[in-house]
Image (cartoon, helix red, strand yellow):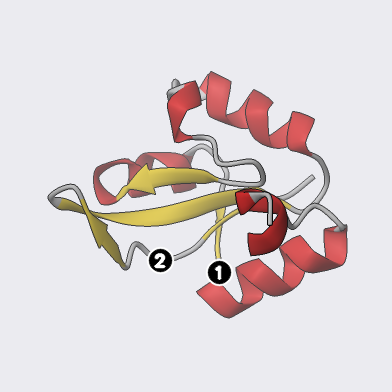
Amino acid sequence: MTVLIDDPMWPKHGTVWAHLVSDESIEELVAFADAADLPRRAFDLDHYDVPVERWDDLVARGAVPVDGRELVRRLRASGLRVTSKQRHGR
């Protein structure tokens, strides 16, 4: 079981965002997010968008910090990555 989090570096809505993923299963990711009280609206098919304000708490709860490239590499290797084409239905 590994839940991964990248560095908050994606600006939007007045804050900076990170991505939270599982390299095992979506069920694991959702369970972790539910335990951390992340809103379901933050879920985007294969990851959660999380604001910088939650980053330290999620790491303290067990999310493993990785850089963005490692996060995507591990998400793809898990078979859980949703492509842009799948995400947008094209």
Residue 44 place in picture, x, y as percent: 55, 41
Residue 88 vertical position relative to residue 40 in the rendered view, above or below: below
* Nearer-N-terminus badge (2/1): 2
Residue 68 place in picture, x, y as percent: 53, 73
Q: Residue furthest left?
A: 14
Q: Residue furthest front?
A: 90
Q: Is residue 3 visible?
A: no
Q: Is residue 87 visible?
A: yes
Crowd band around label 1 with a 10 angstrom C-alpha radius: few (<14), some (14–19), many (20+): few
Name the kind of residue labelled 2 in the image: Asp
Q: Give the residue at mark 1.
A: 66
Label 1 SS? loop
Which is nearer the eye, 59 or 50? 50
Label 2 SS? loop
Name the kind of residue labelled 1 in the image: Val
Residue 16 place in picture, x, y as percent: 24, 57
Crowd band around label 2 with a 10 angstrom C-alpha radius: few (<14), some (14–19), many (20+): some
Residue 90 place in picture, x, y as percent: 68, 57
Q: Give the residue at mark 2.
A: 7
Quarter of the rendering containing residue 41: top left
Real-space Cα separation, disc 2 to disc 1, in angstroms: 7 Å
